[in-house]
Each structure stands twice: as C-alpha cells, then as structure tokens.
Image: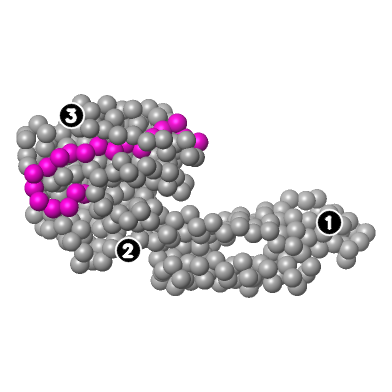
Amino acid sequence: MVNEKRLLDTFLGYVQIDSETKNEKAMCEKVVADLKALGLEVKTDKAGEGFGSNGFNVHAFLPGTLPGETTLMCAHMDTVKPGNGIKPIITDGVIHTDGSTILGGDDKSGIAAIVEAVRVIKEKNIPCRNTGILFTIGEEGGMNGAKNMDYDMLSGKEAMVFDSSGEIGKIVTCGPGQIKIVATIIGRSSHAGLAPEAGISAIQVAAKGIAKMNLLRIDEETTCNIGTLKSEYATNIVPEKAEFVAEVRSRNLDKLNAQAAHIKQCLQEACDEMGATLEIELTTNYVSFHVAEDDSLVQRVVESCKRLGYEAGTEKGGGGSDANVMALHGIKAIVLATGMTKVHTTDETLKVDDLNKTAELILDLMTH
C-alpha cells in the first residue's frame, strides 16, 4: 500500500542531508517541514543546547479513531562520521555509497518509513490509532538528544524505536545499561637510567590492576572492555601518569554496578600496593530496559508481522539506544529492525525491499 517510489525518493533525499551528531539542524528543519505539510501539529525542544548540538528533537501527533494506547513511532536524525556529502547508489536493489562515507540508513531508514506511513494514512484517510511521531538528535555517542529531551511534549507511554539492523520482524525487547570508567593513575616520575627505584611507574601500576580484572564476556548479560590505556613518556623517564578508559554493559543493574566496582577495586588495590594515587570517575550513561515477550506491545508487532507474512522474533540487544533513556522516563519501549547492515561503517547497505517492508510494518501497526 505504500508508495514505493515516493518512499525511496524520500530516503535518498534524507541521507543526502548532512546530519552528523551535533550538526542535525538541516535534517531537523526538513522533517518539521514534511510533518507540517501533512497537517500535523509539530513541537520541538531545546535539547541541542544541552550537549552542543545545533539541532532539536521533533515530535508530532497524529490523532486517530481506533482504540488502544497512544504509541510513539521513533527514529533518530543524526549519523556517525563520515556522514557528510553522502551520495547514495543503488545496485541490484541494494542502496550503498562509493565507500567514502556511511549510508545513513542508521537511522534515516526509520524516519523515511515512518513519514511514508503517515502520508499513506493521510492521503487515503485510513482509520488509525493515536500516534506520536518522535525524531531525536544526538543518539549516536550517548543518546544525548533523548537525555536532554523535553518529555512534557511527548504523547504516549509506549514506544517503538526503529533503530536496529537485522531482518524486518526482529524485536529487541531488552538492552544493557552502560557505565563508563575514566581513571588517571598517578605515580612518581624519575630518571629511568639513573634512579628508576625512585619512581613509581603508572604503566606498571595499571598493568597490575588490569591483570586482576575480569574482562570482555563476563556472563550472558554482562560485558566489560578497556578502550584506552595511554601513557606517553620518553624511555628514560619513569611514567608518572597513565590514562585508563573502560566501559561495562549489562542487562542486569546489579551486575552492571558490581562489575564497575570490580574494575575500580582492581585499580585501587594496585595503586595502594605500589604507592600510586587513583583518580577515577564512574558515569552511568544509561540503564537497561526490558519488556516481557508476552507484553501487549511486543505482541502487537508479532500480530502485525503475521498479517504481512513476515517472520517475527525477539532478541536481546547488546547496545544502547533511545529506548534505554525512555525507560528512565516511564516509557515502555522496544527496538525494531529496519534491515540496515554494517552500520557505522562505509560498507553500510540497505535493501530497497527492506525499506518498503519497514514502511508497511509501521503502517500496519498504526492502523490496527
């Protein structure tokens, strides 16, 4: 029922609008214009001011007549780098680039599909549910748009976030929380040739601490990884400082906190043992979200997939999304696939057929 040519043209137009994180203004203005052209009431906020972006979150409301909870249909407007000057190419039904940039299907595939579903409803006057449309900024790199959002402008306490790779019908019902750990180990500088015993090597202290750590896959719910261990000195200088940056993710809040505490303890014990000082900061970037598989929100997607002939299935997520932040604000959210592949790389692709299927799924969800 969707207008496939119009949908494709919309998507191709969206990805050619530069909107790397913190530079989403042009994309924000475009979707505001598109939603207003459909006769929707559009609201924006000042979320960008909270993290140095020139953009803003966009919310519109489509009033309906069908019974049921108001549902937010969500996607994010920003892209990762390199996301400027995107020139989409279609080869055998697959959209890609020349390899010098990402494609931007993450997450403009979700935006284009949602806009097309609304267009079909409006032009054919199809009965629908009360539906909120939410397009966010700053999702990449920490969901800062959602964190700084004016939640008073939103309608509904349920959300479907179209922001996952994978086959259409994939439903992510839970995702991990994340704690970022930034530490500085301070030892004591000394000449490494004349008086090494007078120094305290921050690198050696860090190594002792890391050797005690349980890292990478902790259990089925928890991971932990060190991304940075940096200390740059001449070889004749005992290094005084070392920078340590790591993350912990877990779908279990107790395990998340316990693993972060474990990392801190290992570093502190190493510092105490060798006479160094530890400066450490633990920041909870987002918490986990979880929606039961038999929840009505999930089952709506399952039933919609049955009607369309798609294979639905639930999965446990391993990354963060706007759904994690929404959970903190009392919004029950799940994440759905749009078919995008190899996201965050210059090899990113999206099948035209998957773009069409995503729009058909959104249309069905809004009209049942």
Q: How crowded is mark 3: few (under 14 residues within 10 Å), some or many (20 or more)?
A: few
- Tell me the element at label 1: loop
> With respect to residue 171, does 266 lie above or below?
below
Residue toward you, 15 or 142:
142
Quarter of the image where the N terminus is located = top left
Residue corresponding to mark 1: 189
Residue drawn 37% across and 42% down? Answer: 150
Question: Can the viewer see residue 348?
Answer: no
Q: Which of marks 3 and 1 is in front?
A: 3
The image quadrant that residue 97 belongs to is top left
Q: Residues within 10 Å of mark 2 (few under 14, many from 20)?
A: many
Residue corresponding to mark 3: 39
Q: Position of residue 142 (x, y in %)?
A: 46, 48
Which amino acid type is shown beneath numbered disc 3? Gly
How much space separates mark 2 and mark 3, taking CA atoms?
35 Å
Question: Can the viewer see residue 169?
Answer: yes
Q: Which of marks 1 and 2 is nearer the N terminus?
A: 1
- Are the two marked residues, 3 and 1, in contact with CB atoms closer than 8 angstroms? no
Q: Position of residue 92 (x, y in %)?
A: 23, 39
Residue corresponding to mark 2: 290
